[in-house]
Image (cartoon, rainbow, N blue to C red):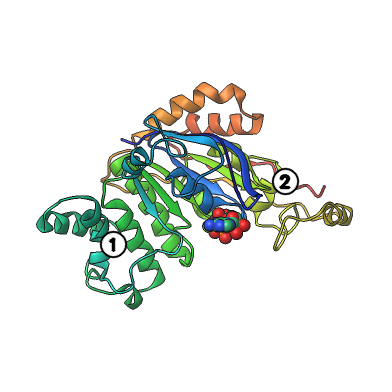
Amino acid sequence: MGIEVVVEGLTKSFGGQSVWRDVTLTLPAGEVSVMLGPSGTGKTVFLKSLIGLLKPERGRVLINGVDMVNSPEREIYETRKLFGLMFQDGALFGSMSLFDNIAFPLREHTRKKESEIRRVVMERIEVVGLLGAEGKLPGEISGGMRKRAGLARALVLDPQIILCDEPDSGLDPVRTAYLSQLLIDLNAQIDATMLIVTHNLDIAATVPDNMGMLFRRELVTFGPREVLLTSEEPVVAQFLDGRREGPIGMSEEKDAATLAAEADAGAVPAPPRRIVPQLEPSPGLPPRAAVTRRRQRVMGMIDSLPPAARSAIRETYASHAAAPTLTVPSAGSGT
Ligand SMILES: Nc1ncnc2c1ncn2[C@@H]1O[C@H](COP(=O)(O)OP(=O)(O)OP(=O)(O)O)[C@@H](O)[C@H]1O
Ligand SMILES: [Mg+2]
């Protein structure tokens, strides 16, 4: 059963330059959340702060009463064992077979016998679809297989909180679709709390219960997926529509003059955005335990949400079985 992660007023900087300020959000127990954000906005720094590998100057990260920022190092170390972390670059040891890579956390953190380690590792290898490749070195397999090996390694300690840093980078669209399904299936099987950092709009649209976005050193928004998917916040709309027009520039955020020039030029309106149904677990798997909890939670807060999100949520839940596709009005109307 997943564990809630409560982030309060988190602020992190390097050498006087802040990465983000005052980030407050809750990852609800057992739900899947996605964090979006242009390159360099501090998504990886955020994940590392959650597990206590980086130390924000202000704020708290509460997990089972332990503060991953300020509690004694010993408590942080113990709590870190609840996490499974899939790194952005796979972070496999090049000289070790996939089997040994995936077995590494078990050998490092547990006193399991080799026969038990073998059983757990092979189970995880099967889950991520790598049976037969366990003897290969990371250099002998494709990037997508390395990603899945990284995920298998994140799973061996039965994590209750899973963090995935750009699990899709370097994957083709078909593999990305399989990965999306794999993430939902995992959630159905172990009910872990999951946070996925991604740039991939298909994953963002189909996988999470909740979504947030980092931009300009702040958390722009975090909440039920429908809030972000119907948002007219310029930066959110630009990101979701994958457009050049908007506050996000090539290497940095755009300055006011560039934005004004764009406005004068009258950008073409973005096509209407569609909310597609969230993925369901594969046939034969149990339903996701988080679904009922999430429904209660979201219906409890619905009156505080923007109108577009409210109607999207009502529509989703009203015709849940019918898996509706609904259309929301376009955000970018050439302003
Ligand atoms: N250990 C560090 N020391 C100093 N600066 C750092 C360190 N780690 C990250 N940064 C800086 O913090 C900022 C955010 O980096 P981060 O890697 O979190 O971005 P990101 O959102 O994950 O980007 P991407 O999408 O490209 O992976 C960057 O400006 C980066 O240079
Ligand atoms: Mg990153």
Which residue position holds label 1? 129
Provide the secondary structure element on which disc 2 rests: helix
Q: Please identify the residue farthest to the right as the structure is shown.
A: 264
Q: Residue at x 69, y 41 (%)?
A: 329
Residue 82 image offset from top left, x and y in percent: 32, 42
Residue 136 in percent (x, y) is at: 26, 74
What secondary structure is marked by label 1? loop
Q: Nearer the viewer, residue 294 or 10?
A: 10
- Residue 317 in percent (x, y) is at 48, 31
Q: Quadrant of ligand 1?
A: bottom right
Say which amino acid is labelled 2: Pro
Chain-order first, disc 1 or disc 2: 1
Residue 39 makes an appearance in the image: no
Q: Would you say residue 233 is visible in this rendering?
A: yes
Relative side of 65 to 301, left or right: left
As drawn, is 87 to the left or to the right of 231?
left
- Give the residue drawn at x 36%, y 31%: 64
**90 in relation to 247, above or below:** below
| Residue depicted at x 58% and y 52% | 42
Identify whether 85 is placed above or below 192: below
Label number found at residue 181: none
Marks 1/2: CA–CA distance: 39 Å
Image mark for residue 234: 2
Q: Nearer the viewer, residue 333 or 222?
A: 222
Hey, what amino acid is under mark 1? Gly
Mark 1, ligand 2, within 8 Å: the answer is no
**In the rendered view, does 186 fall on the left or right side of 265?**
left
Residue 38 in picture, x, y percent from top left: 62, 55
Neighbourhood count class around disc 1 (C-alpha, 10 Å): few under 14, some 14–19, many 20 upward:
some
Q: Compare residues 135 and 310 and report the one nearer the observer.
A: 135
Label 2 Cα neighbours within 10 Å, binned few <14 / some 14-19 / many ≥20: some
Give the left or right position of residue 172, taking residue 236 as reference: left
